[in-house]
Amino acid sequence: MSTDKNGLKVIELFAGIGGFRLGFERAGFETVYSNDFDKSCKISFDGYFGEGAMDLRDVTTIDANELPDADVLTAGFPCQPFSKIGKLHGFADARGTLFFDVLRILKAKQPKAFVLENVKNLVAHDGGNTFKVIIDALENDLGYTVYKQVLNTKDYGLPQDRKRIYIVGFKENIPFKFPDPIELPFTVGKVFENEPVHDFFYLSQTYMDGLQKHKDRHAERGHGFGYKVLNPEGISTALVVGNMGRERNLIQDVPRPSGVSRKGGPLNTRGIRKLTVRECARLQGFPDDYEFPVPVTTGYKQMGNAVSVPVAEAVARQVAMALEAARGSKLEEETSAIPVRVASR
């Protein structure tokens, strides 16, 4: 799974299904601890990384001193309190306050670096005040040098328009540069299943008619709202939790005139269907041998919440380079400080 080891260790909080872990391990890091309290995530996570790979305890109950030492801490802390799709309660939402447990553990463990990920809207939430609180705590309370940038999954090898804020910090004043974008190697059509999929993923004609009416109403008002059928030669919109995101990521497959929907009605005549969980996993960079032994709706939720693996890997490689460069500079300084003895004749 991983490339050459770099000797750096990671502890991860809010691990989800392991997007951060996969990315960091591909960049040569060793994961020494993973935590998330979502039981369904643990089923998928442990199924891939090994039984017991995830600690399922509530992070608020964990004594930070029990955790192993590590060079880097990663956390995709809950984004729903800051997402435009949610109710934007921020720190007023119990999930939003979990960020302070990230601070608590950072303060106790003092890793050399951290990498945090959240929705783009975190930057603008509450007029920017939420983000100011976060950055101020990391810089002034904990003493980290902090870098932040919005990264888009489509710029790092996957055909998905998914913008997320990445916050990277170093305990020392270490120069850091976020990864440069790369040319998109393939389009969304390459993630589609090769074999026919179950009727479950096809929309019924009744549901399709409703979606079309909804789209027509908004079109009359000059709005662009409504379902979207993806161009196989293009990219997808962001995968999110809930039906809305899947209705913006529909595809046109082979029509099934005799197919029956799960509610008993006929399938739509155009062959319009949702992406499968596997197709969503490919859009997030998860390997095909990563299984999701959970209900389909749960699999969709896991995909919507996941960290895009290639983005995590690209950031991880930059973090490793920055730490290695700093270590080299420190060794050079220490070596130059050693007095040179001149042998007497």
Image: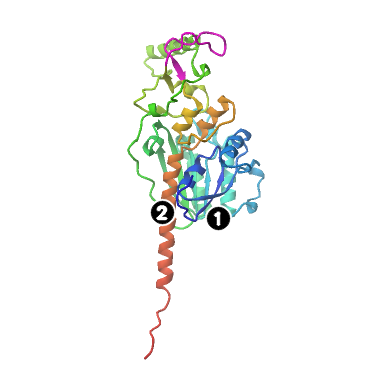
Q: Nearer the viewer, mark 1 or mark 2?
A: 2
Residue 287 place in picture, x, y as percent:
48, 36
Q: Quadrant of residue 101?
A: top right
Q: Is residue 250 above or below residue 204?
A: below
Tell me the quadrant of the picture where the C terminus can be found: bottom left
Question: Residue 208: which disc?
Answer: none
Q: Reading the chain from its start, which is encountered first: label 1 or label 2?
A: 1
Q: Is residue 177 above or below residue 309?
A: below
Task: Name the residue at 45% across, 38% down.
Answer: 123
Residue 323 place in picture, x, y as percent:
44, 56
Task: Name the residue at 34% across, 40% down.
Answer: 182
Residue span colored magenta: 254-273
- Main SS category, magenta section: loop
Of 160 and 253, which appears nearest the observer? 253
Of 209 and 260, which appears nearest the observer? 260
Give the structural element (helix, strand or loop) at label 1. Answer: loop
Task: Identify the amino acid type marked 2.
Answer: Met
Residue highlighted by disc 1: 110
Of 136 and 9, which appears nearest the observer? 9
Residue highlighted by disc 2: 321
Q: Is residue 198 above or below residue 308?
A: above
Task: Identify the amino acid type marked 1.
Answer: Gln
Asked whether 329 falls inside the magenta stretch, the response is no
Is mark 1 in CB contact (under 8 Å) with mark 2?
A: no
Residue 241 place in picture, x, y as percent:
52, 28
Of 303 and 218, which appears nearest the observer? 303
